[in-house]
């Protein structure tokens, strides 16, 4: 117990003293003194359309080449992450050969072995809805001793302090700047270092960036976007409507997405139709209400989907709900 308290104290002291770009390494070094490991991945993100979108990924004792290879592999095999999502707060021990044992997973297995990630101890903290959260994955090579029950117990106790200390570190950073905004992890907010490295990224910001840069890896802002934000302070989202603005505080950028209203992004008729459709009315009922044919209603809905950058009714309902909450 004394050792656990000492490490927790180190984490919170690091939160107070370490610069944002150094905090993860300092904190993980403290954790490794109690639960030894060869390397680690600390990442935040969420599931969307069956894929995992990274909002921040920090590799500890891993070369950049390893991190670059692991991102597309994690997206290709999301079950390795979703296992942790099923039981947040539980420390899972994984044998990588078992996770990626199927023939189609061989590239993932070879990559894990190349970088000494054969043994994993992973734990997650998930937000409400079990669709987004924060993960820590500790790794040992096959030649090292396996993780045991003691390691799992210690990790379950310390990881909430690790993530909590990270939040304190970010909050203190911004609080130290005059007139700094609140950085509660909201969906429309993000925080990056000045080189574009993502510290926190809300889902709305992530979706907006991915729309303009489909190949964005979620780890560092696309260079054209970062350059324009630094030079002009704001970037238009084009057909999506709205904008992303940036304010500098200390050694970070605070990004805020301002979405255009549905009424601004659609014609009056389109807005009327999608409001009815999002409320659960069918094509025939909407056609009768609006004096249109069902085929015309269907075409309007599909055209509105394209304008809004969505492809199903559930997404439309969320947009309408969000718009009503902001009004």
Image (cartoon, grey):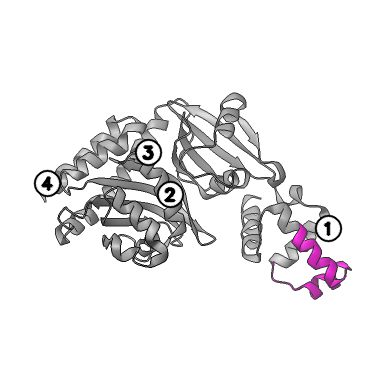
Disc 2 packing (10 Å; few <14; some 14–19; many ≥20): some
- SS class, disc 1: helix
Left or right, residue 255 beside residue 158: right
In the image, residue 97 lies at what x, y percent? 29, 62
N-term mark: 2 or 3: 3
Q: Which mark is residue 64?
A: 3
- SS class, disc 3: helix
N-term mark: 1 or 2: 2
Disc 3 packing (10 Å; few <14; some 14–19; many ≥20): few
Q: Nearer the viewer, residue 72 or 11?
A: 72
Q: How many marks?
A: 4
Q: Which mark is residue 71?
A: 2
3D distance between C-alphas at marks 2 and 3? 11 Å
* Label 1 sits on residue: 269
Disc 4 packing (10 Å; few <14; some 14–19; many ≥20): few
Residue 198, placed above or below residue 307: above
- SS class, disc 2: helix
Q: Nearer the viewer, residue 39 or 295?
A: 39
Q: Which mark is residue 75?
A: none
3D distance between C-alphas at marks 4 and 2? 34 Å
**Which mark is in front, 4 or 3?**
3
N-term mark: 3 or 1: 3
Disc 1 packing (10 Å; few <14; some 14–19; many ≥20): few
Residue 293, placed above or below residue 204: below
3D distance between C-alphas at marks 4 and 1? 65 Å
The magenta segment: 279-303
N-term mark: 4 or 3: 4
3D distance between C-alphas at marks 4 and 3? 32 Å
* Label 4 sits on residue: 3
Left or right, residue 276 beside residue 18: right
């Amino acid at each position: 117990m004394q050792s656990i308290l000492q490490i927790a104290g180190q984490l919170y002291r690091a939160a107070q003293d370490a610069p944002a770009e150094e905090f993860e390494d300092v904190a993980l070094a403290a954790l490794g003194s109690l639960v030894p490991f060869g390397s680690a991945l600390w990442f935040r993100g969420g599931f969307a359309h069956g894929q995992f979108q990274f909002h921040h990924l920090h590799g500890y004792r891993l070369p950049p080449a390893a991190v670059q290879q692991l991102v597309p592999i994690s997206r290709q095999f999301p079950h390795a992450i979703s296992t942790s999502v099923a039981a947040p707060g539980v420390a899972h021990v994984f044998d990588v050969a078992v996770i990626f044992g199927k023939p189609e997973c061989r590239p993932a297995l070879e990559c894990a072995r190349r970088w000494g990630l054969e043994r994993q101890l992973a734990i997650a903290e998930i937000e409400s809805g079990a669709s987004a959260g924060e993960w820590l994955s500790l790794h040992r090579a096959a030649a090292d001793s396996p993780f045991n029950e003691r390691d799992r117990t210690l990790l379950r106790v310390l990881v909430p302090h690790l993530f909590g200390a990270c939040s304190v570190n970010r909050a203190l950073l911004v609080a130290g700047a005059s007139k700094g905004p609140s950085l509660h992890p909201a969906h429309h907010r993000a925080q990056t270092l000045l080189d574009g490295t993502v510290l926190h990224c809300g889902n709305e910001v992530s979706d907006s960036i991915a729309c303009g840069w489909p190949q964005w890896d979620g780890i560092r802002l696309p260079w054209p976007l970062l350059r324009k934000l630094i030079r002009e302070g704001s970037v238009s989202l084009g057909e999506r409507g709205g904008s992303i603005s940036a304010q500098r505080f200390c050694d970070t950028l605070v990004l805020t997405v301002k979405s255009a209203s549905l009424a601004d992004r659609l014609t009056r008729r389109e807005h009327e139709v999608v409001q009815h459709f999002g409320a659960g009315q069918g094509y025939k009922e909407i056609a009768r209400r609006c004096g249109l044919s069902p085929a015309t209603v269907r075409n309007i809905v599909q055209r509105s989907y394209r304008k809004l950058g969505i492809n199903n009714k559930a997404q439309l309902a969320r947009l309408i709900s969000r718009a009503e909450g902001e009004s």
